[in-house]
Amino acid sequence: MLKNKSLLLLILVFVLPFVLANLVHHQHWYRAGELNQGEFLPEQVMLLLPENRQWLLLHPQTAQASQLLPQLISSLGREQHRVRTFAINQLSEQEQARLSPDYWYICDPTGLVLLRYVIPPTEAEKLQMAKAMQTDLRRLLKMSKVG
């Protein structure tokens, strides 16, 4: 009987983790590699901005943007000098055509638009979107030496 218990314990210790990992993988309980809160753009968009050495928050010109952006920038603390805001309507017509006014965007200092965020209808969702942008910006600024 002791021999059977040892064999059963040995099987549980070595086989059970593989069975559980397989179950987690096939049931899609774990989303691997997704740390960002925003959505990657379906196509690559490069902006031609002269003398840009900062990360950009691209936004449509709205009252909501003028209300949220100063708070979002100041919440970055000592890294706030590396980020500036830029209205989409200040871009060239060709660049405006590639960006939807229904989103806010994060653009790196080289001009590559990385992430987009849907502009939500309610005030509570707007604060969640700003928090998501803040989280992504902090991560990008921490990992990047550019800007």
Image (cartoon, grey):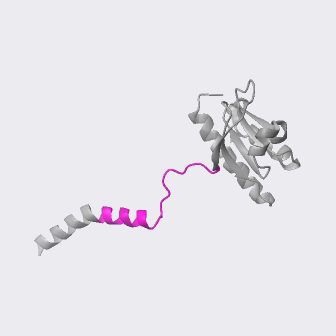
Left-right relation of 119 to 141: right
**Residue at left 65%, top 48%?**
41
Asked if the magenta segment contains residue 27, the reply would be: yes
The residue furthest bottom is: 1
Instruction: Give residue 55's position: percent from left, percent from top.
Output: 69, 34
> Looking at the image, which residue sits at the far right?
63
x then y, percent, for residue 62: 87, 47
State the residue at coordinates (72%, 35%). Answer: 47
In the image as oriented, which residue stretches furthest toward the top? 51
Q: Quadrant of the C terminus?
A: top right
Percent x, y of residue 100? 76, 49
Q: In the drawing, does residue 138 fall left or right of residue 8? A: right
Q: Quarter of the image for the N terminus: give it.
A: bottom left
Camera sees residue 73: yes
Q: Quadrant of residue 53?
A: top right
Q: Give the quarter of the image for residue 120.
A: bottom right
As for residue 34 lying within the magenta part, the answer is: yes
How many numbered discs?
0
- The image shows residue 87, relative to residue 8, as above or below, that is above
The answer, for residue 70, to whether it is visible in the render is no
Q: Residue at x 67, y 31 (%)?
A: 109
Picture residue at 81% right of the left edge, 41% below the top: 88
Above or below for 55 versus 102: above
| Horizontal and vertical percent position of residue 43 | 64, 46
Looking at this view, is 22 or 141 the one in front? 22
Q: Magenta segment range?
A: 16-39
The residue closer to the viewer here, 114 or 72, is 114
